Image (spheres, rainbow, N blue to C red):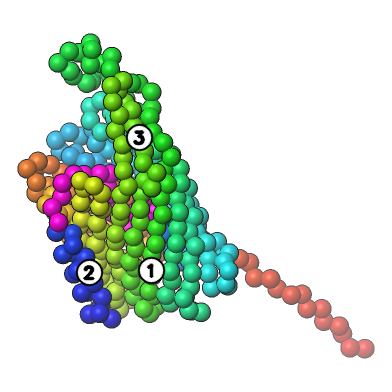
């Protein structure tokens, strides 16, 4: 099966070679923040609930703590659907991105809902549609840190109030569970279906237009103890193309062990080499990502640390009481 799907990932990687012309909010470890990538990932796992959290410090070796992004998501699958094989996913996400010495802060809060349509009775193949909605705003944190040619006039032109609007997005995804261990996913999502207008100065405003995220990822067994997890992601918007491909190897210390070590490499087109590492213990995954820039900003570096926990709540079995009547 691995030979069937590797060409698909190769095509994605070729697509990602288009030149990067701008940069938007992004994570290297999207496996630890899947709702941000596509709302169709909401509830798309086996378990009762999932908590994911990540922290990114961009250009950490040049401007530490000046380009930071924490993000937190919680989602859960619900046994509700038009068919007994279908289910609904619900979730929420919060992020806050701070940029520069002036602490230009972008804050977002979103709710997510997805419908997972099983294409067969064993849920081997699932088609998902999803929506997300919420708010997104920007605010200048420290006006005194901005420097203008005319310092007084420039600072007077800045607004201290937050500015933003309604965030609306949608996503589609196809999941194929090839067998008990191997899985492949392909999805596309649209962000900012309603343009968000930011007005941080008295003399003008800026608009954040629609963005598309295209992604493919999978988990494939190499043997009883080793897996490979390839992934390709592309972000497309007017004036923007950000794409990367990566692969992680997972190694189980023993066939019956609950511990897995993770490690791999990635490449963000025209921008950075990615180093991935982490570990898994049962339903807990902890991972780090390190980006070493290959752009003119080299040796700029970025660092991420994230965690994913999938909780499983088992219902108590209902035991029928049996009353034994003695024979007389």
Q: Do the residues labelled 3 and 1 touch (CB within 8 Å)?
A: no
The circle drawn on residue 197 is 3
Tell me if residue 170 can be seen: yes
Q: Looking at the rendering, which quadrant does residue 170 occupy?
A: bottom left
Q: Nearer the viewer, residue 47 or 255?
A: 47
Element under label 1?
Answer: strand
Quick one: label 2 or label 1, which is nearer the N terminus?
2
Q: Residues within 10 Å of mark 1 (few under 14, many from 20)?
A: some
Q: In which quarter of the image is the C terminus?
A: bottom right
Element under label 3?
Answer: strand
Q: Nearer the viewer, mark 3 or mark 1?
A: 3
Tell me if residue 45 comes above or below residue 239 in the rendering. Answer: below
Q: Which residue is drawn at 25% across and 25% down?
A: 102
Quote the CA–CA distance across marks 2 and 1: 15 Å
Q: Residues within 10 Å of mark 3 (few under 14, many from 20)?
A: some
| Residue labelled with disc 2 | 9
Q: Residue at x 29, y 65 (%)?
A: 216
Quick one: label 3 or label 1, which is nearer the N terminus?
1
The circle drawn on residue 174 is 1
Magenta region, residue range: 18-38
Residue 101 in the image: state x and y as whole percent: 23, 27
20 in magenta: yes
């Amino acid at each position: 099966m691995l030979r069937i799907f590797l060409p698909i990932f190769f095509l994605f990687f070729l697509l990602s070679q288009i030149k990067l012309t701008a940069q938007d909010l992004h994570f290297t470890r999207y496996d630890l923040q899947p709702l941000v990538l596509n709302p169709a990932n909401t509830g798309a796992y086996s378990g009762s609930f999932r908590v994911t959290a990540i922290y990114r410090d961009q250009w950490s070796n040049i401007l530490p703590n000046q380009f930071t992004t924490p993000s937190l998501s919680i989602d859960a699958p619900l046994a509700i659907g038009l068919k007994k094989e279908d289910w609904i996913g619900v979730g929420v996400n919060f992020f806050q991105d701070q940029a520069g010495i002036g602490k230009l802060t972008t804050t977002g809060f979103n709710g997510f809902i997805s419908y997972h349509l099983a294409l067969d009775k064993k849920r081997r193949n699932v088609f998902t549609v999803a929506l997300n909605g919420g708010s997104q705003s920007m605010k200048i944190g420290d006006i005194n840190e901005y420097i203008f040619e005319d310092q007084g006039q420039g600072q007077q032109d800045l607004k201290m109030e937050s500015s933003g609007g309604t965030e609306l997005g949608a996503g589609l995804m196809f999941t194929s569970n090839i067998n008990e261990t191997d899985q492949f996913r392909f999805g596309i999502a649209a962000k900012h279906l309603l343009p968000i207008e930011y007005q941080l100065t008295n003399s003008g405003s800026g608009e954040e237009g629609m963005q598309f995220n295209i992604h493919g990822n999978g988990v494939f067994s190499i043997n009883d103890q080793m897996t490979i997890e390839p992934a390709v992601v592309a972000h497309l918007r007017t004036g923007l193309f950000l794409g990367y491909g990566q692969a992680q190897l997972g190694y189980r210390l023993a066939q019956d062990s609950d511990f897995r070590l993770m490690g791999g490499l990635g490449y963000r087109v025209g921008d950075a080499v990615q180093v991935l590492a982490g570990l898994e213990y049962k339903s807990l995954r902890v991972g780090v990502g390190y980006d070493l820039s290959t752009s003119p900003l080299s040796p700029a570096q970025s660092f991420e640390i994230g965690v994913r926990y999938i909780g499983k709540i088992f219902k108590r079995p209902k035991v029928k009481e049996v009353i034994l009547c003695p024979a007389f």
